[in-house]
Image: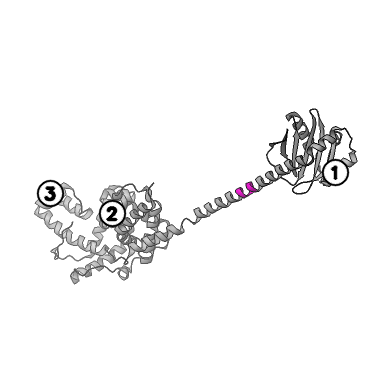
Amino acid sequence: MRSTAERQRRFDVLARQYANDLYRYALWLCGDPTQAHDLVQETFLRAWRALDSLKEQKAAKGWLITILRREHARGFERKNLPLTDIEDVVIADEGEMAPDDQAEVHLLRQEIAKLPRKYREPLLLQVIGGYSCEEISEQLGLSKSAVMTQLFRAREKLKAVLNTGDGTMSNVHELP
Amino acid sequence: MNYLEFKRQLMVDPYTRDAAFQEAKANDPQCARAWREASVFEHKLRAALNVGVPGGLAEQIILHQSLKAVRRPIWPQTLAASFAAAALTFGLLTWMHQREIDQFRTFVAEHWHSDGGEILGRATSGVPIDAAEFRAVLAAAGLDADEALVRQVAYAKNCPTPNALGVHLVLRTSEGLVTVFYAPGLVNRKAREMTVDDFTALLVGLQDGSIAVIGKTRAGRDEARAAVARSFKPLATTRT
């Protein structure tokens, strides 16, 4: 049995470490900042109650995302709002990007919002969550091949909207 | 990994640490070029997904949790309060009951010392008691009794008890004379014994009061107790 102070410390670490990623995930999931905020708060509240069941700290992010997805499925899904106005709610740091790139990022956002959830969610888990295809398949309860197909289709749809010209690109950034 | 496999991997998981993928990226110029193109797209994708987050979100969550954590234990607190109230009530009732028992014990001891021996002496002298007189004594304490008990009575009188006018009886048993005090309104749920001088008093609860059965032998006390318990009736019931 952990002491209350230790429990609180663990919780604070989780909140500081994962709140932002969870919010981004929630916003892309439900499309409404207020809902996303509530969803993240409810997720952490449930996490607090079940904190003793989290045995390994490295599993925390996946555990939180699972809670968030369940919460979303439980109550928030019914009042889902369309993601068409995503630009209104997105305030991200794009200061280092060239204007053309910024325009493409805006275009991408519109297209991500329009993606069917079955394509959007694996992409969120991969890019925001940092999960491998195996981990995404576990998280979503799908086969690995289904996840790979969905990721392929998601990128295919998004790339299709970007005019990449002859494929020669500026501002090349290495993947981590 | 050939070029087509590499291209497919870029579309599926460009972040993979797969050894064959890394080798193709490093050694195959065609794959390296595809990698650079994919990197540009992935950079934009990450930027697109990197939506703004409300300032101080983590702190808001921690605050929200701490407020809920304080408010949440309302039902356990209510439960605890209920248990405490129940325990308090139980304790109070136990204390009140114990107080009544103590009152009864005090009454029995004081009353025995007051005239217990003297009344027993009078009963021993064999002066008979009239049945009507006996019933009048019982009626004053709100009681009536069966004929069988009337025949057993050697002496009867009313006496003050803690709650109301009671009855002081001496009954004939196979073990000799046994004294019975009846105190209306005193509750004594569990049979108890106490010593008064050379006698033992058995304290027993009845429906509307308690009796103390004082005798030398257990058999005598038990016989008297059974006779009284069987015979005593509330006055109103027998009159209607």
Amino acid carrying label 3: it is Glu
Kindly state the secondary structure of the residue where label 2 is placed: helix
Q: Nearer the viewer, mark 2 or mark 1?
A: 1
- Do the residues at pointers 2 and 3 share their chain? no
Any magenta on residue B99? no
Of A101 and A166, which appears nearest the observer? A101
**Mark 3 or mark 1: whose residue is earlier in sequence:** 3
Q: Which residues are magenta?
A: B90-95
Residue sitting at x 88%, y 32%: B126
- Outermost residue on the top side: it is B174
Mark number, residue A77: none
* Residue for badge 3: B23
Mark number, residue B137: 1
Q: Is residue B49 visible?
A: yes
Q: Nearer the viewer, mark 2 or mark 3?
A: 3
* Residue for badge 2: A150
Q: Main secondary structure of the magenta part?
A: helix
Task: Kindly check if marks 2 and 3 are in contact, taking CB atoms under 8 A apart as contact.
Answer: no
